[in-house]
Image (cartoon, helix red, strand yellow):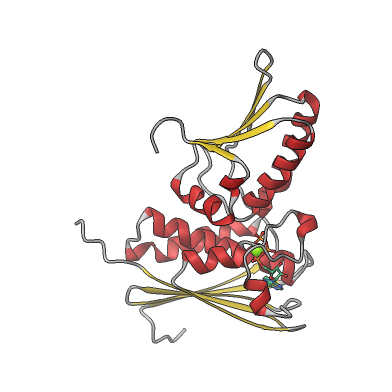
């Protein structure tokens, strides 16, 4: 996972590069929570461009991070979500809670 | 191994979360001879990952156990059985409901069975409390008409 904080825009970006399953999700959760609590950013972005696999562990992970972000007054957004993962988000109602920005088309 | 199927494989893994990726990749490789689309492969990998993860966190509750994966090919149909000898499911109908989870404290979302059901053509769950759970999933790989 690559983490970038844009101080001027108070924008914290997590570019997830690992597969999101039960095995890997605990580490992602810990790192994300640490960074959000450290910067208390205005906006948190999860970039899914490099995510080739995600199962239901990702749903729980994102809802949990959304709660942390909301508690600290941060907005959260997902970008570059591929169709196979989008299908899982839609099934679980995530788009009703967390904004998914597909940037332009789609 | 004698079989009435076109192909068959058996896999036994320890209930360690680091084996989840291995299990789904092994099944994907096994069915790749049917020339599935990227979407079909992705659906199968996700469904396998859901069933294996359930055995690890619910069946064995993170203690050590064995998960059996049996995979068969019958013409263009793949049949995947994933079983554990863990604690079993009390009420299968309730467990299958979207968003139902007995482990909310682990940030599980209760979507595993819903994903298996929608990504595969058929899902069958058999379970006996105290003895274990077996999940059977089937999917027919469409004939690739492009080439
Ligand atoms: N192999 C199993 N052994 C025992 N109980 C199981 C097993 N598989 C599922 N269950 C029970 O069925 C419930 C629903 O399973 P499902 O996969 O749909 O959701 P989950 O695992 O709780 O959450 P998610 O899969 O979204 O992370 C589980 O919470 C658990 O109580
Ligand atoms: Mg599950």
Indicate whether B91 appears above or below A99: below
The residue shown at (62%, 61%) is: B111
Q: Residue furthest top?
A: A8
Where is residue B45? Give x, y as percent.
50, 59
Q: Residue furthest left?
A: B147
Indicate whether A9 appears above or below B96: above
Q: Is residue B17 left or right of residue A103?
A: right
Quarter of the image where one finds residue A48: top right
Indicate whether A63 appears above or below A5: below
Where is residue A95? Give x, y as percent.
56, 45
Quarter of the image where one finds residue B141: bottom left
Q: Residue furthest front?
A: A96
Q: Is residue A41 left or right of residue B43?
A: right
Quadrant in which the C terminus of chain B appears: bottom left
Where is residue B20? Give x, y as percent.
61, 59
The residue shown at (40%, 55%) is: B39
Decide if residue B14 is in sight here.
no
The residue shown at (46%, 43%) is: A82
Where is residue A17? Give x, y as percent.
57, 37
Q: Is residue A74 left or right of residue B137?
A: right
The residue shown at (67%, 54%) is: A22
Q: How many marks?
A: 0
Question: Residue A3 versus residue A69: which sits nearer the camera?
Answer: A69
Which quadrant contains ligand 1? bottom right
Indicate whether B45 appears above or below A65: below
Quarter of the image where one finds residue A104: top left
Question: Residue B7 versus residue A82: which sits nearer the camera?
Answer: A82
Decide if residue B78 is in sight here.
yes
């Amino acid at each position: 996972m690559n983490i970038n904080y844009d101080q001027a825009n108070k924008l914290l970006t997590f570019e997830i590069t690992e597969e999101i399953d039960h095995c890997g999700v605990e580490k992602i959760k810990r790192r994300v929570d640490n960074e959000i609590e450290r910067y208390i950013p205005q906006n948190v972005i999860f970039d899914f461009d490099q995510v080739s696999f995600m199962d239901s562990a990702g749903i729980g992970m994102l809802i949990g991070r959304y709660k942390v972000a909301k508690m600290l007054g941060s907005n959260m957004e997902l970008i570059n979500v591929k169709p196979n993962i989008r299908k899982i988000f839609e099934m679980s109602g995530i788009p009703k809670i967390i904004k998914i920005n597909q940037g332009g088309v789609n | 191994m004698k079989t009435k199927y076109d192909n068959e494989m058996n896999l036994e893994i320890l209930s360690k979360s680091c084996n989840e990726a291995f299990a789904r990749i092994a099944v994907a490789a096994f069915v790749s001879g049917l020339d599935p689309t990227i979407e079909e492969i992705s659906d199968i990998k996700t469904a396998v990952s859901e069933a294996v993860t359930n055995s690890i966190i619910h069946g064995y509750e993170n203690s050590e156990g064995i998960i059996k994966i049996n995979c068969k090919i019958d013409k263009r149909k793949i049949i995947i059985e994933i079983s554990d000898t863990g604690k079993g499911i009390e009420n299968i109908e309730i467990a299958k409901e979207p968003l139902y989870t007995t482990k909310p404290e682990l940030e599980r979302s209760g979507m595993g069975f819903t994903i298996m059901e929608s990504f595969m053509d058929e899902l069958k769950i058999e379970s006996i409390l105290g003895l274990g759970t077996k999940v059977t999933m089937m999917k027919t790989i469409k004939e690739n008409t492009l080439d």
